[in-house]
Amino acid sequence: MKKEDYLIKIQRKFKQLVNENELNEKEIAITCSVLTAQEAIGDPGRNDFPIQKGKEKLMQACFGCSYGQAFTDMPNGYRGKLEELATIPLQTNFDRAVFISGMNAVLRELKMTECTIHCKDDGPRKCSVELVEMIEKEYGNPKIAMFGLQPAMVEVLAHKFTLRVFDLDEDNIGKDKYGIVIESGICNMEAVQAWADIFLVTGSTICNGSIVDFLKIEKPVIYFGTTIAGAASLSGLNRFCPQSS
């Protein structure tokens, strides 16, 4: 599957929902604003999140009384109608972030998804503790392949499980994080799948298109974060994001 194909399928489902709910003909606008690190995650008691280092920005869409978000490395503002959002080309990371954040807001308003706002302050730490509890309950003591460095999770997971962490940020690759040397996300996926029992994957992979690499994996895949909220609801992906609102 090409990286555009999965998101195009999601966009078609979204367009159908827009039509079914008679939203196409209404003058409804989506506004996306780029949040600062403080607005996005508050003070988590650490300074090693990608958004704090300027590596990512969090775009936020507002529709009705609901909000949707998407992490991206190509932030900008956007305003348009739902009929435009449902047909926006998905060629760049910016296009995809606009569509995904907007879709998350709309699906939240339609009560078709939940937990679309990133947790703040001590939320990441609480999330990590809950993640360990969930993994122990559902999977025992698995070997975990994590794609997308989430430092709070890595710190807690590294004490409990055999863990490998993969990331696309060259500033992270080769660095030691809590006893784990970060590996390149451009890797032999078959070899990683042969090693791992479960995968933890950042939902931001839907913005850069690399999510297609994980859709075909035959091991359990758990996506984390707010970015993938709507897509996970529409396509039945396993998502973990307990501290988001």
Image (spheres, rainbow, N blue to C red):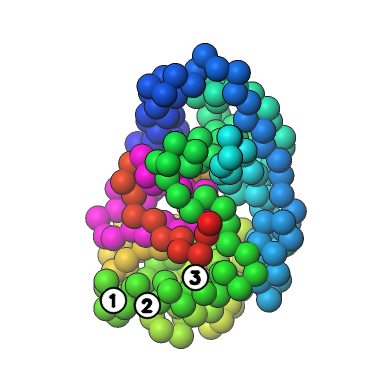
Q: Is residue 213 magenta?
A: yes
Q: Position of residue 55 (x, y in %)?
A: 69, 55
Q: Which residue is mark 1?
A: 137
Q: Which residues are magenta?
A: 211-234
Does the residue at mark 2 contact the one at mark 1 (Cβ under 8 Å)?
yes
- The residue where tag 2 is placed is 133
Rendering coords of residue 193 (x, y %): 31, 62
Q: Percent x, y for residue 79?
A: 68, 27
Give me the C-alpha separation between circle 1 and circle 3.
15 Å
- Residue 29 in the figure: left or right of residue 9: right
Write down the quadrant of residue 188 in the picture.
bottom left
Identified by mark 1, the residue type is: Lys
Few, some or many residues within 10 Å of mark 2 (<14, 14–19, 20+) = few
Q: Which residue is mark 3?
A: 127
Q: Residue at horizontal 54%, vertical 39%?
A: 105
Judge left or right: residue 69 versus residue 108: right
Asked whether disc 3 touches disc 2, contact meaning CB atoms under 8 Å apart, the reply is: no
Image point (57%, 53%), residue name? 117
In the figure, residue 140 lies in which quadrant?
Answer: bottom left
Instruction: Farthest residue to the bottom: give it.
Output: 159
Amino acid carrying label 3: it is Cys
Identify the secondary structure beneath mark 2.
helix
Above or below, 171 relative to 18: below
